[in-house]
Image: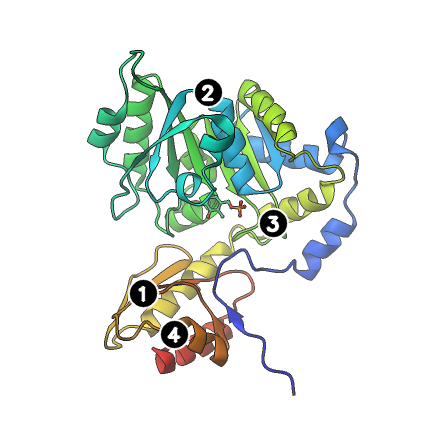
Amino acid sequence: MNAPTPIDLRSDTVTRPTPAMWEAMRRAELGDDVFGDDPTVNALQQRLAADLGFEAALFMPTGTQSNLCALMAHCDRGDEYIVGQMAHTYRWEGGGAAVLGSIQPQPLPNQPDGTLALAEIEAAIKPDDAHFARTRLLALENTWGGRVLPMDYVAAATQLARERGLANHLDGARLFNAAVATDLEPRDIARHFDSVSVCFSKGLGTPAGSALCGSRELIGRAHRWRKMTGGAMRQSGVLAAAALHALDHHVDRLADDHAHARALADGLQGLPGVQVDLPQTNIVFVDLAPDRAPGVVDRLRERGVLATGLYRLRLVTHLDVSSDDVGRAIEILRRTL
Ligand SMILES: *Cc1c(COP(=O)(O)O)cnc(C)c1O
């Protein structure tokens, strides 16, 4: 007898293409994107740039590479970028900006809502003096840990950076989750930034792919870095077709993932030694008392729920998690926690 398929709440990256997405990929018109003649990649880049209000966009294999090329397009060797201590570009991307770009990060603590305090940003901007790296860029992340940055904060922080001569970059791996959760157009969030990176491989459900948006000039520089860092692909229209399909069919449905996350959080309330944050989007954090935490991830796996974390479980809803799965997961989680 086959074991039932586990409910995979480790990440929204684990989704498989839907039959309709496979069909869009199969039918994609292809070319060689290094020659610039893959029509599907070109269509995706034009579509995304227009949707988000930028001159240009560049398709990338991963969000890590998209952020890296953005940082290297904004900053030269010996420049500095201001970033959250817990931001993906700083903490989860292998230090690529420093290693490959000779760009010094200036990390600042993330407040519980994901913001960087304006006074701390201001104090971190270095004077023009030979002692200091040149502070060139503020990098924010939205959503951050599933939280949506408040829009008045985004406006204030990016304005502060601009007034001090810095550019603004957004790691918008889950920008569409932020837009759906706030009922804003993605471009209303993106318009505060000089560059925005988005992932298609998270909530939007494609097998791979991200994109960087910015001015023609910035994207021109990022294009050189993408080639140099090995990210220029050939018939990548296969992946771009999945992204185009996702933009048409998988954005509004993110509201389902958010509702599922909310149901999951509601279903886990009231357990002793377990503290559940109410999610704003598709990520639920569950804090466990130290005596409950050991082995929880292993026991959940044995019972058919995949999760990550240690004292803080992270449960992520996505395209391949149904309402039934949520109900089943709640039952297994309650039994296990
Ligand atoms: C997933 C993610 C990225 C990029 O990740 P890749 O796995 O390289 O595509 C960047 N930033 C955030 C916030 C992410 O969650």
Label 3 sits on residue = 246
Mark pair 4, 3: CA separation: 37 Å
Mark pair 4, 1: CA separation: 10 Å
Q: First in sequence: mark 4 or mark 3? A: 3
- Scheme of colours in the image: rainbow
| Residue at the spot 32% in from the left edge and 41% down from the top edge | 85
CB at disc 3 and ligand 1 closer than 8 Å: no
Residue 17 at least partly seen: yes
Mark pair 3, 1: CA separation: 34 Å
Instruction: Between label 3 and label 1, give the one nearer the viewer.
Output: 1
Callout 3: SS: helix
In the depicted structure, whether residue 292 falls above or below residue 29: below
Say whether residue 268 is left or right of residue 246: left
Residue 50 at least partly seen: no
| Residue at the spot 73% in from the left edge and 50% down from the top edge | 25
Residue 77's tag is 2
Label 4 sits on residue = 295
Residue kind at label 4, given as amino acid type: Gly
Callout 1: SS: loop
Residue kind at label 1, given as amino acid type: Tyr
Residue 131, picture quadrant: top left
| Residue at the spot 26% in from the left edge and 77% down from the top edge | 271
Callout 4: SS: loop
Q: Residue furthest left?
A: 119
Q: Residue 116: image x %, image y %?
A: 27, 37
The answer to whether marks 3 and 2 mark residues whose Cβ atoms lie closer than 8 Å is: no
Mark pair 2, 1: CA separation: 39 Å
In the depicted structure, whether residue 327 falls above or below residue 209: below
Q: First in sequence: mark 4 or mark 1? A: 4
Label 1 sits on residue = 311
The foreground one among 331 and 323 is 331
Q: First in sequence: mark 3 or mark 1? A: 3
